[in-house]
Every structure is written in structure tokens, then in C-alpha cells.
Image: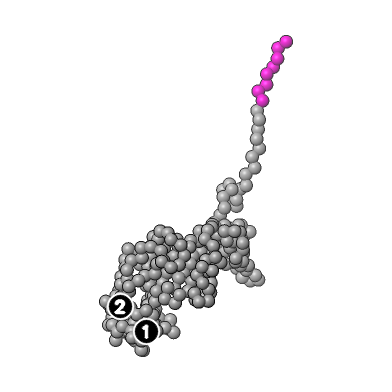
Amino acid sequence: MNQLKIPMCVVTAGFILVSANGQAGEDIPFDEAELFFELNDTDGDLGIHGKVDGDEWKRLVIEDPYERRMMSVRANGRLKRQGITELFFESAEPTFDELDPDDFFKRFPQGLYEIEGVTLDGEERENEVYLSHVIPAAPDHVTINGLPAPEDCDAEILPIVTAPITLVWEPVLGPHAELGIDGDVDVRYYEVVVEIDDTDYKSTSIIPGGLTQWTIADMNFFTLSEEGEYKFEILVRAESGNKSAVESCFIVE
């Protein structure tokens, strides 16, 4: 008796989740999402900062590495209809006498944080950002036209200089010696700010990490202070996003 052999095929059904943009199983991130620490080494305080930027959204949640919610933002009313595209925030920055740095870092553990949101169209957005406890050392041994910068603006004697003003500092090569944990530090950039207290007048420059001096040559700017006193801040930002800053004052005659 002849037997007819029929080949058997096993078909496996696969279920694939497709996101709104047609890409399978892929989270859609915000255009920009970051969390970082900022140290004011002169005043002795620390804070956590964050920024989110992207398509119009109505809800935002930030969770720490242990999936504990630490921030929730929800637009309501007419703002919910309009949508939010960019949000920047800074935490309070109590001095080290009020909040010990070790306790601060326990409050905001190192690791991956999730930033999640929902757009006006109901699409989900999600980013994972790494928050590091490696804090860059602050710029040190600052000089103003060759004169040592005082410890802070409350010094009894402030250096008296003439414009243009050149600020020089030592390169930041590693982590802060007293705060955070040890680790490599790659400088992304320095930021130099010179301003007149209690006014809107300031000069701000962001310069490459390979430069450790900057000249403010606008002579008109240095005629704006009636008392001739100017405040400067030199800030370093590491590739991790973390920042450290020093500040002091000088007088232009």
C-alpha cells in the first residue's frame, strides 16, 4: 500500500509591539534629558539640577535607581491643552552645615534614573540618565590680571585692576578631594561669568575644556558698575554633566 507523506511545518506566531512611529519595541526618548549635581565650592553647597526638552508633553515622572518616584509634573487646564516642551529645575542648595554632603548623596543615589513622559498625543517618552557621584574639583588658584583672587567677595581687601580683565586658573584634572567618590573627570567645558550684583548686567562665556584663561575685553561693560565692583564665577562641567564652581570679586578702576 502506497503511503503519501505530507511534510509538516510548525508555524510560530510572534507578537511584536509596534510603537507609534512604526519601530518595533523601541522606546521613544525626549530630545534632551539630563540630571546632574552642581557644587558651589566657595559657599559650600550642593544641589541637583535637571532639564527635559522635547515634543509637547502633559505629564512627566522621574524615578530613582530603586524605582522610587522623586518628581511628578502634570499640566492642567489651558496649559495641558498647550503642552510643555522644555523644563529646567534646580533643587534647594542648603549649605553643608545644614545638610552634610554624605547625607545629600544618600538622598540622591548614584545610578540610572528614568525620566518618563506622555505627549499631548498620548505617546510615551522615556530616557534613562546616569547620575554620577564623581564631582569635578573646582577651578583653583584663580588670578585676575595676575593678582590672586580673594577667597570670596566678603574679603576685606579686593584686588584693584584695570580693564580689560583676564582670568586665569589651574586646569581641572580630577575629582573633588572631599566630596563624592573617586573617579575619572573629563572636562566638557568651562563657563566664565562676570556680573554686577543686584543688576541684570553680566558677561557669560562658555569655552573649551582645554583653555584655562579668558579675557573680557568689552571696555563699556566695565563702566556700568557705579562702585566699580564686579563678581566673577568660573564653573567647570564634566562629561558626566556634574558641575563645580568658584566665585569671588574684584574692583575695576
**Separation of residues labelled 2 and 1 (CA atoms):** 12 Å
State the image quarter where residue 9 is shown: top right
Residue 148 numbered tag: 2
Q: Secondary structure at mark 2?
A: strand
Q: Is residue 73 left or right of residue 150?
A: right
Q: Badge 2: how crowded within 10 Å, few (<14), some, or many (20+)?
A: some
Towards the viewer: 32 or 91 = 91
Q: Which residues fall within the magenta stretch? A: 1-8
Q: Position of residue 70 (x, y in %)?
A: 60, 65
Q: Position of residue 87 (x, y in %)?
A: 54, 68
Task: Give the position of the N terminus as an image quadrant.
Answer: top right
Q: Is residue 7 magenta?
A: yes
Q: Is residue 120 left or right of residue 36?
A: right
User: What amino acid is labelled 2 in the image?
Assistant: Pro
User: What amino acid is labelled 1 in the image?
Assistant: Ala
Q: Earlier in the sequence, mark 2 or mark 1?
A: 2
Looking at the image, the residue that sits furthest to the right is: 1
Looking at the image, the residue that sits furthest to the top is: 1
Residue 167 numbered tag: none
Q: Is residue 181 visible?
A: yes
Q: Position of residue 185 (x, y in %)?
A: 40, 61
Colour scheme of this structure image?
one colour
Q: Which residue is mark 1?
A: 155
Instruction: Say above or below: 2 vs 198.
Output: above
State the image quarter where residue 147 is shown: bottom left
Q: Residue at x 50, y 59 (%)?
A: 130
Q: Is residue 161 left or right of residue 112?
A: left
Towards the viewer: 213 or 133 = 133
